[in-house]
Amino acid sequence: MNRITKIAAGSAVCAFMVALSGLPSAVAAAGDTPPYKVAEGNKVDAQTLSGWKTWRAMACERCHGAAQEGMVGPSLVNSLKVLSKDEFKATVLKGRIEKGMPNFDTSKMVSENIDNLYAYLKGRSDGAIQPGRLQEIGK
Ligand code: HEC
């Protein structure tokens, strides 16, 4: 193999690896890989636990119900089946002020935990995580 073909082969490998590294997010977007880990319905990974703590700290249940079943705000068990993650983030951070959904982008806790909050609510929506108190897996 001369030098030029070696370089060409090398960049082909690179392109292949870039394609591979793009796979996990594509799979997650298709909904195959849940963004949370759960055991026995009430034990979750540390990130999802932080999502639940954020939900509690912000008292989202005032409007969406303790089991996300909906009150003045819609049932998030239903909403998370149709909302994309980006739509979720935009709604929670920017709010829909005129419709009664406050914006939470002024909260450091929500801004830092928006992915965790999504993971928690997705787990509730999927029926994988029970309503109520959670603890961390293995603790
Ligand atoms: C003061 C009441 C109130 C609070 C507190 C509140 N929400 Fe809402 N929320 C609403 C209302 C009302 C809507 C419906 C807005 C509309 O009609 O589009 C809504 C909509 C949403 C939606 C979009 C649902 C959909 O189907 O489009 C999400 C997601 C959401 N809220 C999440 C949260 C989270 C997470 C929190 C806590 C950080 C929270 N909300 C706190 C009232 C509230």
Image (tube, rainbow, N blue to C red):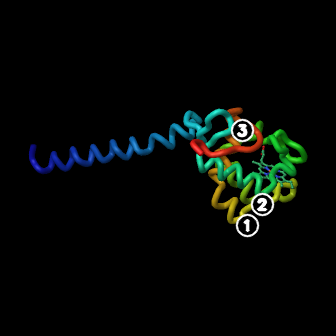
Residue 81 appears in the rendering: no
Answer with left or right where residue 55 lies relative to residue 63: left
Q: Which quarter of the image is occupied by the C terminus?
A: top right
In 3D space, how far apart are the residues under numbered discs 1 and 2 (Cα atoms)? 7 Å
| Residue placed furthest toward the front | 139
The tag on residue 49 is: none
Horizontal side, residue 77 vs residue 15: left or right: right
Q: Amino acid at mark 1?
A: Thr
Residue at 63% x, 47% y: name it: 48
Q: CA distance from mark 3 to mark 1?
A: 25 Å
Question: Mark 1 — residue?
Answer: 106
> Reading the chain from its start, which is encountered first: label 3 or label 1?
1
Circle count:
3
Q: Secondary structure at mark 1?
A: loop
Q: Position of residue 127 (x, y in %)?
A: 71, 32
Q: Is label 1 in contact with label 2 (beta carbons under 8 Å)?
A: yes
| Quarter-of-image position of residue 57 | bottom right
Q: Please, what secondary structure does the residue beneath circle 2 have? A: loop
Tell me the element at label 3: helix
Instruction: Provide the residue designation for mark 2.
Output: 103
Q: Kindly identify the residue that appears in the image at 81 percent across and 54 percent down.
A: 59
Residue for badge 3: 124
Q: Residue 68: where, in percent of width, then height?
A: 80, 42
Q: From what the image shows, is residue 107 above or below residue 26?
A: below
Q: Is residue 98 above or below residue 123?
A: below
Tag 2: Cα neighbours inside 10 Å, few (<14), some, or many (≥20)? some
In this rendered view, identify the residue nearer to me: 88 or 54: 54
Q: Mark 2: which amino acid?
A: Asn
Which residue lies at the image location 87% right of the left edge and 57% below the top edge?
Answer: 98
Whole-percent x and y of residue 135?
Answer: 66, 45
Mark 1 crowdedness (10 Å alpha carbons): few <14, some 14-19, many ≥20: few
